[in-house]
Image (tube, grey):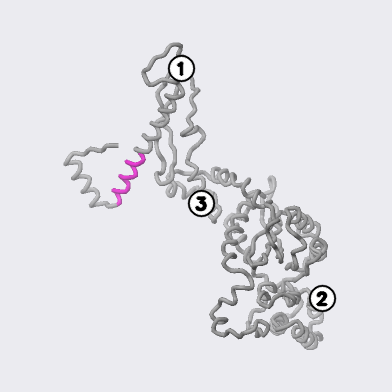
Amino acid sequence: MKISLSVTELKNVFKEIQRQPERIFEMMRVEMNQSVGEYLAELMRAELTHFLGREPYERKAGETNHRNGSYERQFAMKRFGEVTVEVPRDRKGEFRSEVLPRSKRYEDELRKDVCLMYLTGISTRSLSMLSKQLLGRKISAGEVSRASGELVEAVERWRTRDLSQEKIKYLLVDGVNFSMRVGKSVEIVLVLVAVGVREDGTRLVLGLQAGDKESAACWREFFKDLKSRSLRAENVTLGVMDGLAGLEMVFKEEFSHAEVQRFEVHVARNVLAKVPKKLKQGVADDMRSIFYASSKEKAKEFFVQFKEHWEKEVPSAVKCLENSLEACLTFFKFPPEEWQALRTTNIIERLNKEFKRRTKSMEIVAGENACYRLLAFISLKMEVHWKRNPIGKVAYNLPIFQRVPLLDFTQNAVPQQSKVDGL
């Protein structure tokens, strides 16, 4: 597009720019928008010529349709904002442009950006308010939901993908509750989560499945689904989980070659719930000595001391720990460099924390598919981080282990911490 200005007009333009330097960018946007709008209109006029089979003002025998002027419409484009386009039309109303279909209000790149912003944490309401400034066109909350809804098929393919090529040795399983819209009501819905640890120590999310409640039957169906997707059960040697009634039994039935490691933090909370406030710190310190012992034999020695010390004052707490002790010490059968990852809830709890952080601003998740979209995005983002931090291998890269090469993981000292509610 050719722009011509007189000397006087040019001087006025420069004066305006000197007073308001940002005006130059506004002027550039206006000129670019006009040029883009004219370019799109020209493409559609060429489309109409092809549709009618003749150039403007050209006459042919037997013609039954003609050009019939144009109408204006707005179209939002990435980097250009909202563009005004003259859309040509025919007299019979049969012409349909492929350049700008009637139902299309913005280009696909904008739709992808809207989906990405929504997935990263901006609510539909906030995104609607910001869209005019960021994208050049106000996008309603409903449009944001519909745009993100197009991801359903891709998410479902990921959620039900084949697992036959994954060499999984450990499974970490847990459940997360969400306030979810179900029909016309809002219900607390549990989503079961399984994180797998490959033979090389890297982690990945294997499954997400909504359930009615955290029951043994629900978990059984979840495990069967993983196996139906070709997860090789014979390769799984350990399952890390909480002490939900029936879960360990179901896991052992579905993964007969695997042992069970119970979340030590959950056990500690159950024990401390039976301890008076004034005794909690002492009980927590003694439990920490058991869980962070240098060997299983040493841990059992510490438990004997723990029992002798506390059985008279808090017998129910001692009994609670005794019932869960073997399941809490299973990690000692595995490589020492992996102990820290296997005896804590850090892996699964971090993922659950990210799930909760993303959905906190929403208060209510708009259905099961919407929940899967958000959790799939968070899971894939976490997997990028996990690839750089495989379990059992990161510790050797820390400066302390480089300075003290003879340090043996089996000689871990008991950490001196003062937290009572977690170990």
Q: Which residue is mark 1?
A: 65
Mark 1 lies on a secondary structure that is loop
Foreground residue, 359 or 116?
116
Which residues make up the magenta segment? 22-33
The mark nearer the N terminus, 1 or 2, is: 1
The answer to the question of whether label 1 and label 3 lie on touching residues, with beta carbons closer than 8 A, is no
Quick check: is 421 in the magenta stretch? no
Which residue is disc 2 drawn over? 323
Residue 279 in the image: above or below residue 114:
below
User: Whole-Å distance between the Cαs marked 1 and 3?
Assistant: 47 Å
Task: Using residue 327 as the reference point, say whether residue 348 is left or right of it.
Answer: left
User: Which residue bears the numbered disc 3?
Assistant: 126
Q: Nearer the viewer, mark 1 or mark 3?
A: 1
Spot occupied by residue 238 in the image (x, y as percentages of width and height)? 74, 68
Q: Indicate whether 395 appears above or below 71.
A: below
Give, as a three-letter code, the residue at label 3: Ser
- Farthest left residue in view: 7
Whole-angstrom CA distance, mark 1 to mark 2, is: 86 Å
Residue type of the residue flagged with mark 1: Asn
